[in-house]
Amino acid sequence: MRGKTQRDTTERLSTIFPHHVIPPERLSPRERSPHRDQSLCQPRLLPGLVPLRQAHAADRTKTYPKSGFITACGEWVLFEDASTGDHGWRLAPRVAAVAPTTLTDGAPATDGTIIFPATWINFLALKNLIQEHDSASTIFPSAAGNLGRGTLGIGARFTTLHWPAVEWAMSALNLGLTANQNSIPRELVYDVDAMLDGTLDTVPFPFIGANVPEGHQGQSVEGMSHGCVLSKLKNGFHHRRIAWSFNADHQPIGGKFDTREDALVRGCLLASYITFDLSPELAAGTRAKLADIDAALVAKVRARVAAAGLTLDEAAFTALIEQVWPSMAKMKRRDEKYAAARAAAFTTDAGRAYLRELSIDELPGLTTAETTAVMLALCEALGMKIHFVAPAFGFQKNMPYPDNAALRVLIEKQWTVCRAFDASIGFHSGSGKSAENYQVMGAVTGSRLEIKTSGRYTYEMGRALFASKNAADQALWRDWYRFTVELALLGAFSTDATERKMARSFITDALAKTNSPSDEAVVFATPAAARSAIEALAPSPEHMFWFEYNFLHVLAAEGRAVKSALGDHTVAGYRQRARFYAISEEGRLGFAKNIAAYILFLAENTGLAPASVVATAKARLEATTSLADFHAAISL
Ligand SMILES: [Zn+2]
């Protein structure tokens, strides 16, 4: 039982910095010690507002010189208490009337400036002040520019280690991207208090035959929202005036998520791009009766589908509408909540705008053109502009599509529909396709697409550690590899048929690709035989079993390869996660360069950036040999 005092502390902490909150009693002495570079990602004790002021008064703060921006009341910079990693805003007022109450908890400093803690509440207020002064500001994520037509979705694995790489690529290409993206609540903690109370739900992972707690990446959605903006300011990215977006990916609609949709809406307040995932309601199997749906709306949908050139027989049309109507009605209700939350928090159109994606690739089978058309027509009739729609093309994560001609035919069918509705195509499970696959996607859609990538960047971390000469990086890599070996062996002899089949296929793929004996009957004859086969392999981030299990290591309690340790939101999980944030400068540079290189590859092949621009950026990236130079190139 948590006592009142503890609860108060927790609440206070979560107001201050929602992404670091772990109650102090859960932290080890090592984690209590400050770490400036990791300040946004390391759970640790927050000393609160008073010490921040004391640090400022005693000149113990570090100011980020590139972070400057202007609002009607004056000039702002971001600073950090060098001893604790806490952040604050310093305002040099331009007009006499500016009071410390511009934001919350302000205090006048002796030099005539006013300082404010970088709290969540101040962050929201600042967004509005900035956009009221300059609606085209690119400090916060937005829906501006080409973001609603063509983009790359970059899943933000490893947050502060990751964002600068995306900033670098956007700067080098002069191209706005979906620079912050994660599925909520699947990957991100949607509510820190629910995490602290131990009431997070679990997500089934059939391939490991177990459920893992939600938020397996170990950061909160508010923390991601806050951190990605601070990263832009520290690196001066905002001076380039390149609009970027934040995608709250796969927002679950209906089913068991009905009860917490208000919490999801609250958490995703700063997302400028919402992906609606109807699968929870569809999986619940609810059905409407055609007679109960507004007849005028149905007529409108029927006419619109016909106008888009598709003929649906009446029985098929009715069956489809009756199947999807309950989820569409819930999507509409949720959409109104996202809009209302933004209208309540922000006063400008720029601050309230958000993009919409409709994800239908979770439905079984390949999506037919008719289904896409009906879904888009329904959204249109309900007044929800869809910027991206994600049909199922039968993609496997991290696997090239084997037949480019067949892929072209599939995409052309969908594109004919999308064009009629002025929507772009979202390619989910978009990582790891071939250059030719991306070229087909770009050519057919005229680059009106989004490639969603996420797991790829955990792989890039593995590659960076594997290549690093730093001893601690190597130790982390070895532990990480060992973890996946143990999970694979565990799975290969599981009593769960799906888990066993998947684990064996991952192992045999690695064996076959390294020309090792891979006959399943021999390899899996006994657990000992399987172990000796897998242990004969030279460790490599290219092995499929490493790729498939790797993300689970990040928040595994003490890095242990047992199912009960996965997605651990106690200090044991966060201590494990902290290892990644403590990698060497060489490891960080390698990780950042890998991400940037992958973004350049995607931008070139999808046609989002001209080949000549990509070639220049590639040469610059290859010539970058220090992390400081990498960060310096982000700003003008
Ligand atoms: Zn999807």
Image: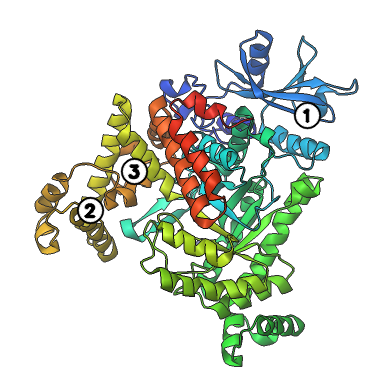
Residue flagged by tag 1: what amino acid is it?
Ile
C-beta proximity under 8 Å, tags 3 and 1: no
Nearest to viewer (mark 3 / mark 1): 1
Give SS at disc 2.
helix
Residue 497 appears left or right of 152? left
Residue flagged by tag 3: what amino acid is it?
Ala
Q: Quadrant of residue 29?
A: top left
- Residue at 49 percent of width and 21 percent of height: 35
Nearest to viewer (mark 3 / mark 2): 2
Residue 529 appears left or right of 103? left
Give SS at disc 3.
helix
Say which residue label 3 marks. Answer: 565
Q: Is residue 576 above or below residue 550?
A: above
Image position, residue 418 (x, y; %): 62, 71
- Residue at 61 percent of width and 56 percent of height: 150
Q: Which mark is residue 70?
A: 1
Image position, residue 304 (x, y; %): 70, 80
In this picture the colour scheme is rainbow
Q: Earlier in the sequence, mark 1 or mark 2?
A: 1
Image position, residue 600 (x, y; %): 49, 46
Q: Earlier in the sequence, mark 3 or mark 1?
A: 1
Q: Is residue 490 above or below residue 405?
A: above
Crowd class of label 3 (few under 14; some 14 to 19; many from 20; radius 10 Å): some
Q: In the picture, which quadrant includes the C terminus?
A: top right
Give SS at disc 1.
strand
Image position, residue 541 (x, y; %): 30, 44
Say which residue label 2 marks. Answer: 510
Which residue is more in the foreground, 467 or 558? 467
- Residue at 41 percent of width and 21 percent of height: 30
Q: CA distance from mark 1 to mark 2?
A: 54 Å
Residue flagged by tag 2: what amino acid is it?
Ala
